[in-house]
């Protein structure tokens, strides 16, 4: 591989750590990350792509759409695929955070704050029941009526 | 005659039948599927049909373009366009998803000179669109329906009110309209005397003046259907007196003391009614003409089980009933002060089955859920459904939320409800230990028995229907065109078996199931009539397995997982995760060019060229 190490900022961490304080849960912006993921994958070395796909397991995340149930939201997106050492590309004020999970290793450059938030989140019980995953929603007009009725 | 000889020489269908004859005949063929078939016979018949086609419904506006529509059907008189997925009616789709009418209105203004009727459903409309429409087609327009639309204000309606003097129908039901004032209704009242249907039901337009309604009633002698937003009923005394031809009324509000309403009298031909906030004390005002009622909307009334029974007993001619499993909750300044059972319940269904033999359409909606409200008496379950199937043999449409269900109640529908075309059943989440799951056999019996079924929705829970049951749905629904599968099946095998059948299925919605992307993709390829798919809640994969269904003219879009703000049961704003959606559909227009941030095209090319 002749390319130099690449920092892949799918989760806009540079923007976030530089900018306004974010609520702990909103660690990444998936909407833009989808387009980014697509464009980066098309530029990646196919051999690396193949080997990582071969070793990864189903629970270890997805590329495009919603994660499987019971998956830790933080670890699910294509972290194993796209982690690359950030040698020489380190943004000032950040240090590498290395995560070992189910046979894969991921490295991120994060600020201290971010690292604390991540650890806090990982410590939380993020298990979801089937019901709360996709609750039945009520029709809009009925919902509005029930609200209005309370106000009468 | 010379002309006869000329005509017989110019036939081009090879059978000796002159075009002229066929042009006359085709006017008698109305069904869209028949016209479709006719247009496929030969080029000449296609041209004749195209020139003579009066109405077109485009189920998803992104499947074609205004130009293509013009080329195909230049002489259209009536157009219906739909855009946002049906899930938008349940707050599941981003508001800015798309479905802008602008390009269509521009083409209509430019080219569709014969257009008299326009129906936009779940689309985004701007004031400027309404202004253009009024300017270009104002005098020709006879019917305008902005159905569950958004993006416009009463200023846009002002243009319609001023310019559309020949409007017979103005329909705005459930649209989100920015209200500046009530002038639009005043303009309509001043400029129109042919109005037959006026509907701004379930909009939040409160500045519409009742005086203008009265003026419309006086000027428009053919006024037959009026449904409005909240408006004190006692202010409408003059309106009801003037609207002598009125058959349908909906909306209003009861803010005065109950005794006041005893003096309220309704128009003599009134047979379709829905009074908002109607309670037990006001209900008697409709007793005098209850036996005339054909349609009753109690979705927004405040009645309990006993009231429902009392009322329904007096309506032997009822054909359409809409009712809510609404718990009787009385609030004062936002604090719950009283709880009564405001439900139709099994008992209500038994009364319905006994008294309303003409019932064609029944919708039982889900009401408020408060903790600890599960009560045997109040909820709908198998005994009520069985009574309904036995008693109401004319039933064509049934949509119901149930708390419990058995195979035998579904079997009853299969055995007795031979007129059923549209069946939708949702099993509520609250109760554990439902009597009789899985429902495989009941579902099979229902599908086998109800052979007129065209629309089918089943929303259960894990364990509610096995993979075998899903296979039954595929095997026994030969004529069903639309389906919603909610929390059904156990594994990919289920959807794969399902998709071997359903030969007529055009539109499929799947929610909260466990199917993988690959299984979904393969199923799409197997369902031979499928032209539209919506999925929320599925097993995503690391690899782009959806690629398996990539093909020409098949647009695939994703709404990735996002955070949405919803109201929790106490009304507080809560941020929840909304799982990703897949939307896929056939289109002759290529991928959309107006994606909002929340929607992402699935670009197969990006993966294939990696």
Image (cartoon, rainbow, N blue to C red):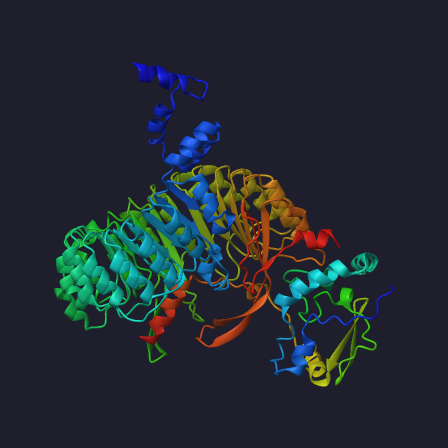
Q: Is residue B280 above or below residue B58?
A: below
Q: Which is more toward the observer, B486 or B21? A: B21
Rendered residue at 32%/18% (across/down) = B3
Q: Is residue B215 above or below residue B573?
A: above
Left or right of B149, for residue B188: left
Name the spot of residue B248 as percent of width and height, x first.
Answer: 23, 54
Name the spot of residue B528 as percent of width and height, x first.
Answer: 57, 39
Q: Which is more toward the observer, B227 or B310? A: B227
Is residue B36 visible in the rendered structure shown here? yes
Q: Which is more toward the observer, B556 or B115? A: B115
Q: Is residue A104 above or below residue A53?
A: below
Left or right of B336, for residue B140: left
Name the spot of residue B561 as percent of width and height, x first.
Answer: 60, 65
Rendered residue at 62%/47% (across/down) = B494
Q: Is residue B574 above or below residue B551?
A: below
Left or right of B606, for residue A55: right
Query: Which quarter of the figure is the N terminus of chain B placed in?
Result: top left
């Amino acid at each position: 591989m002749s390319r130099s190490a690449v920092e892949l900022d799918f989760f806009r961490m540079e923007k976030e750590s530089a900018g306004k304080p974010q609520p702990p849960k909103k660690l990444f912006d998936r909407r833009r990350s989808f387009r980014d993921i697509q464009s980066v994958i098309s530029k990646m070395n196919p051999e690396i792509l193949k080997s990582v796909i071969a070793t990864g397991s189903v629970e270890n995340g997805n590329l495009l759409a919603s994660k499987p149930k019971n998956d830790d939201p933080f670890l699910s997106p294509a972290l194993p695929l796209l982690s690359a050492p950030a040698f020489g590309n380190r943004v000032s004020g950040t240090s590498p955070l290395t995560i070992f999970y189910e046979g894969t290793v991921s490295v991120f450059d994060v600020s201290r704050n971010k690292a604390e938030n991540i650890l806090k989140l990982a410590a939380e019980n993020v298990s979801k029941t089937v019901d709360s995953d996709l609750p039945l929603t009520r029709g809009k007009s009925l919902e509005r009526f029930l609200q209005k009725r309370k106000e009468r | 005659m010379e002309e006869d000889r000329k005509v017989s020489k110019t036939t081009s269908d090879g059978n000796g039948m002159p075009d002229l004859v066929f042009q006359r005949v085709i006017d008698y063929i109305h069904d869209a599927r028949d016209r479709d078939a006719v247009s496929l016979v030969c080029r000449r018949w296609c041209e004749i049909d195209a020139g003579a086609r009066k109405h077109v419904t485009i189920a998803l506006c992104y499947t074609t373009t205004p130009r293509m529509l013009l080329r195909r059907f230049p002489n259209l008189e009536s157009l219906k366009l739909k855009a946002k997925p049906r899930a938008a009616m349940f707050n599941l789709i981003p508001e800015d998803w798309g479905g802008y009418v602008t390009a269509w209105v521009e083409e209509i203004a430019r080219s569709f000179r014969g257009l008299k009727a326009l129906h936009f459903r779940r689309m985004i409309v701007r004031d400027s669109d309404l202004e253009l429409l009024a300017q270009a087609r104002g005098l020709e327009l006879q019917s305008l329906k902005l159905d569950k639309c958004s993006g416009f204000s009463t200023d846009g309606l002002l243009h319609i009110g001023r310019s559309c003097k020949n409007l017979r129908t103005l329909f705005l039901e459930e649209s989100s309209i920015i209200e500046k004032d009530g002038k639009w209704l005043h303009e309509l009242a001043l400029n129109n005397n042919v109005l037959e249907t006026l509907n701004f039901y379930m909009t939040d337009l409160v500045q519409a003046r009742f005086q203008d309604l009265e003026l419309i009633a006086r000027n428009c002698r053919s006024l037959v259907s009026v449904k409005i937003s909240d408006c004190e009923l006692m202010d409408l005394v003059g309106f009801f007196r003037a609207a002598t031809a009125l058959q349908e009324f909906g909306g209003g509000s009861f803010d005065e003391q109950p005794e006041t309403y005893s003096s309220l009298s309704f128009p003599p031909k009134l047979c379709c009614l829905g009074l908002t906030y109607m309670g037990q004390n006001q209900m008697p005002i409709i007793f005098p003409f209850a036996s005339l009622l054909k349609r009753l909307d109690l979705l927004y009334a405040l009645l309990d089980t006993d009231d429902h029974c009392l009322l329904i007993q007096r309506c032997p001619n009822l054909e359409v009933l809409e009712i809510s499993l609404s718990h009787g909750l009385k609030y004062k300044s936002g604090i719950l002060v009283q709880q009564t059972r405001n439900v139709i319940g099994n008992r209500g269904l038994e009364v319905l089955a006994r008294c309303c033999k003409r019932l064609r359409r029944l919708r039982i909606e889900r009401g408020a859920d408060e903790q600890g409200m599960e009560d045997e008496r109040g909820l709908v379950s198998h005994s009520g459904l069985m009574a309904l199937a036995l008693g109401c043999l004319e039933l064509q449409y049934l949509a119901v939320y149930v708390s419990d269900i058995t195979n035998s109640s579904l079997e009853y529908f299969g055995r007795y409800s031979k007129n059923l075309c549209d069946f939708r059943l949702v099993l509520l989440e609250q109760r554990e230990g439902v009597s009789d799951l899985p429902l495989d056999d009941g579902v099979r019996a229902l599908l086998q028995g109800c052979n007129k079924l065209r629309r089918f929705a089943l929303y259960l829970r894990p364990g509610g229907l096995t993979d075998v049951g899903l296979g039954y749905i595929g095997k026994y629904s030969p004529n069903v065109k639309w389906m919603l599968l909610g929390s059904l099946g156990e594994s990919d095998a289920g959807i794969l078996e399902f998709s071997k059948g359903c030969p007529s299925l055009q539109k499929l919605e799947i929610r909260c199931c466990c199917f993988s992307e690959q299984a979904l993709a393969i199923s799409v390829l197997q369902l031979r009539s499928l032209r539209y798919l919506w999925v929320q809640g599925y097993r995503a994969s690391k690899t782009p397995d959806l690629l398996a269904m990539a093909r020409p003219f098949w647009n695939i879009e994703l709404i990735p997982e996002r955070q949405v703000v919803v109201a929790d049961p106490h009304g507080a704003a809560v941020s929840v995760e909304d799982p990703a959606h897949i939307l896929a559909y056939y289109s002759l227009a290529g991928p959309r060019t107006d994606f909002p941030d929340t929607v992402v095209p699935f670009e197969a090319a990006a993966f294939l060229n990696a």
